Image (cartoon, rainbow, N blue to C red):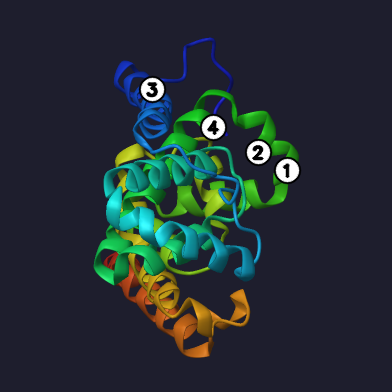
Amino acid sequence: MGKGSSKFPLSGWEVAVGLAVVVSFGIGLLGVYFSMPPSDYSFLKLPRTLEELQTLRDHLEGYASDYTVQVLVSYCTVYIFMQTFMIPGTIFMSLLAGALFGVFQGVALVVFAATAGASSCYFLSKLIGRPLAFSLWPDKLAYFQAQVSKRREKLLNYMLFLRVTPTLPNTFINVASPIVDVPYHIFFLATFIGLIPAAYVTVKAGIALGELRSIGDLYDFQSIATLFFIGIVSVTPTLFSKNQMAESEAN
């Protein structure tokens, strides 16, 4: 790990992005609050079970068609907030996107919100996350640092593999990436592209929300095998590159 430095850890544009995310939270919530009609919104809470999610879906279906912009803004605000501060339950939000908006719009919404939330978490961790990461995941952080250092030349492929497969938790990747010096553009691309397969699986399941009996039904053997296959394809260029380097050194 790099030595500590008194230099401010964020560049000017990174500060601007972080402030934009914070401001968007406030503007989004205020906009939704002042534009929605007077009503009883006691049903609005983060779902923790499939039953609570189905209840929330039933209430929001009418609002999603009549107040589409407000629902989209509030959905993105909540999702980004949860990702930024590592609040569990975003899988329910992904299911909700499918139930309310269908596959295409749902996947686009989830990938956008998840990438924005992961980016916000990245910048927050870069500023204050080092003590938290070392206290929560010391061994995992050391392993991640070693893997990133070893794969620096093909880092995008490795980060794509991590995003597509459940090898490391996404929350850990969001917090640890700036600490082990994963550049933001690599982090962003890997997140944006790598989350699409899992988002598709979850959003599609949300369309048939009433048929789900548990969250475990989302990822059967076929789904997990498909994700790992995509992940292996993403790291294939790295493996070929290593083989070519070994052959060159041998010759």
Q: Which residue is mark 2?
A: 133
> Mark 3 or mark 1, which is nearer the start of the sequence?
3
Quadrant showing the N terminus = top right
| Cα distance between the residues tagged 4 and 2 | 9 Å
Q: Name the residue located 58 percent from the left edge and 25 percent from the top edge.
A: 128
| Cα distance between the residues tagged 4 and 3 | 18 Å
The answer to whether the residues at label 1 and label 2 have Cβ atoms under 8 Å apart is yes
> Mark 3 or mark 4, which is nearer the start of the sequence?
3
Say which element carries label 4: helix
Q: Amino acid at mark 1?
A: Leu
Quadrant showing the C terminus = bottom left
Q: Above or below — where is 113 with respect to 84?
A: below
What's the mark number on residue 23?
A: 3
The answer to whether the residues at label 4 and label 2 have Cβ atoms under 8 Å apart is yes
Q: Amino acid at mark 3?
A: Val
Q: Nearer the viewer, residue 32 or 187?
A: 32
Q: Above or below — where is 228 with respect to 46?
A: below
Q: Which residue is mark 1?
A: 136
| Cα distance between the residues tagged 1 and 3 | 29 Å
Q: Quadrant of residue 133?
A: top right
> Mark 1 or mark 4, which is nearer the start of the sequence?
4
Q: Amino acid at mark 2?
A: Ala
How far from the left and from the top, in percent, is residue 159? 40, 56
> Mark 2 or mark 4, which is nearer the start of the sequence?
4
| Cα distance between the residues tagged 4 and 1 | 13 Å
